[in-house]
Image: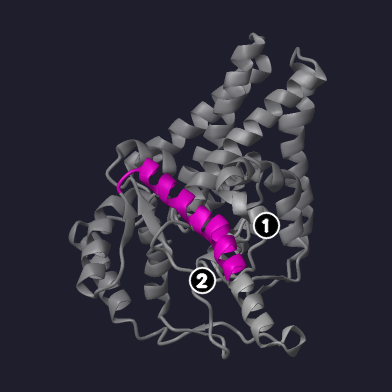
């Protein structure tokens, strides 16, 4: 039986105690709420308006096919931005102190194709606790056998080329989420360390809300829009590919870049570092100085701050990020960041190549060397 995973000195992290105290002082000194402010509400209204506008334009606009294709791509991208900027905070309950507001915005997650209930388990409970730990964090289990993110996984021939095809697979992320992932995760006995014992109402919600999404994005458009079935299929797939690619890239650039680690527990199930230190070693920021990245990514370009303070609305991350970085440096801890989005993208590419092609080449060399050594000492070849 696998041992339960534990972080050593989990309650004795001087770094975490210090950074929490400093962040609390920042909010108290400036008389600020940790929840959404006016700028955050503007973002929420902006992205929801764009999402509804694009959907209605496609459904009722009677536009030319090329224009509809462009709108479908934009709809997919906007769906990802709604997830980043609104639903993500709401499901973390960091959008508002009013839980009804959080529940309403969490429900929007259903309308962009994903279950907020399943996401809460996979992301909030499992990923945020066991970040980048193979066999526990299922966020790094992207496409088993095709993409290798952990050195503990045996590399295969196909993965030699993962630095080429991985980005194409990321574009399938939303399609998988809509038709497969939520169902698969829901009916697993365990997700990471979390034992699944769902309330009965969640069985109904899963299928009911999925059916609403299928109606809004498949059945109704095919009834209302003046397109053939194959034209609809092209538009639907374009929307899914665009949404999946945006989601895949932003999430992978937060944990699978140069500098981030993929630690493994010892034989007793212990992780050497305390939880907060573990988060710093497994999480990265990118393009933190870019106002566009901050506006579009909903704070997910500042994953270091998000992992340490998931209950704080992302609109505050730029300010508390200064505190987190300074404190990490004081304690001699890593603060991993790429200055630009493109820099993070290149870094992710290098990691894919390292864990795929280079690892396979090294493993092959070791095996060949081992076979040569065996032949030298074997009496059969004497």
| Structural crowding at the residue carrying mark 2, measured as other residues with C-alpha within 10 Å and reported as few (<14), some (14–19) or many (≥20) | many
Find the magenta span and give its range: 339-365
- Is 345 within the magenta? yes
- Give the image quarter of residue 224: top right
Camera-side residue of 29 and 220 = 220
Asked if one can make out residue 333 in the rendered structure from this viewpoint, the answer is yes
Asked if one can make out residue 35 in the rendered structure from this viewpoint, the answer is no
Cα separation between marks 1 and 2: 32 Å
Q: Considering the image in quadrants, where does the N terminus appear?
A: bottom right
Question: Pointer 1: what residue?
Answer: 157
Camera-side residue of 224 and 269 = 269
- Give the image quarter of residue 69: top right
Residue 361 in picture, x, y percent from top left: 57, 61
- For this orientation, the residue located farthest to the front is 382
Camera-side residue of 20 and 208 = 20
Magenta part, dominant SS: helix
Q: Considering the image in quadrants, where does the C terminus appear?
A: bottom right
Q: Secondary structure at mark 1?
A: loop
Question: Pointer 2: what residue?
Answer: 129
Kindly check if marks 1 and 2 are in contact, taking CB atoms under 8 A apart as contact: no
Residue 281 in picture, x, y percent from top left: 39, 69
Residue 24 in picture, x, y percent from top left: 27, 67
Task: Tell me if 376 is positioned left or right of 295 in this view.
Answer: right
Q: Which comes before the other along the chain, label 1 or label 2?
A: 2
């Amino acid at each position: 039986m696998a041992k339960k995973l534990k972080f050593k000195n989990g309650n004795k992290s001087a770094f975490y105690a210090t950074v929490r105290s400093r962040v609390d002082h920042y909010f108290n000194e400036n008389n600020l709420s940790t929840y959404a402010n006016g700028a955050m509400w503007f973002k929420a209204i902006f992205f929801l308006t764009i999402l509804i506008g694009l959907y209605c334009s496609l459904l009722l606009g009677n536009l030319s096919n090329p224009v509809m294709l462009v709108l479908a791509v934009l709809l997919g991208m906007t769906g990802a931005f709604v997830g980043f900027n609104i639903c993500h905070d709401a499901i973390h309950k960091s959008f508002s102190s009013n839980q009804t507001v959080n529940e309403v915005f969490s429900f929007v997650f259903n309308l962009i194709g994903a279950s907020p209930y399943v996401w809460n388990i996979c992301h909030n409970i499992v990923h945020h606790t066991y970040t980048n730990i193979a066999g526990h964090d299922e966020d790094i289990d992207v496409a088993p056998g095709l993409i290798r993110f952990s050195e503990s996984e045996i590399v295969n021939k196909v993965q030699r080329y993962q630095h080429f095809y991985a980005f194409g697979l990321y574009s399938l992320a939303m399609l998988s989420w809509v038709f497969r992932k939520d169902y698969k995760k829901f009916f697993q006995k365990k997700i990471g360390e979390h034992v699944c014992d769902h309330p009965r109402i969640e069985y109904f919600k899963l299928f009911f809300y999925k059916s609403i999404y299928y109606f809004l994005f498949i059945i109704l458009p095919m009834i209302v829009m003046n397109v053939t079935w194959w034209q609809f299929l092209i538009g639907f797939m374009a929307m899914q590919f665009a949404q999946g690619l945006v989601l895949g890239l932003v999430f992978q650039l937060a944990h699978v870049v140069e500098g981030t680690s993929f630690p493994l527990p010892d034989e007793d199930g212990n992780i050497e570092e305390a939880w907060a230190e573990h988060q710093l070693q497994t999480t990265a920021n990118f393009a933190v100085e870019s106002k566009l990245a901050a506006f579009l990514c909903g704070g997910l370009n500042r994953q270091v701050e998000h992992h340490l303070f998931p209950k704080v609305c992302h609109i505050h991350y730029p300010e508390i990020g200064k505190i987190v970085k300074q404190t990490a440096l004081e304690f001699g801890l890593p603060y991993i960041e790429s200055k630009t989005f493109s820099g993070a993208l290149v870094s992710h590419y290098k990691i894919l190549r390292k864990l795929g092609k280079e690892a396979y080449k090294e493993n092959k060399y070791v095996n060949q060397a081992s076979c040569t050594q065996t032949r030298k000492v074997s009496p059969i070849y004497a």
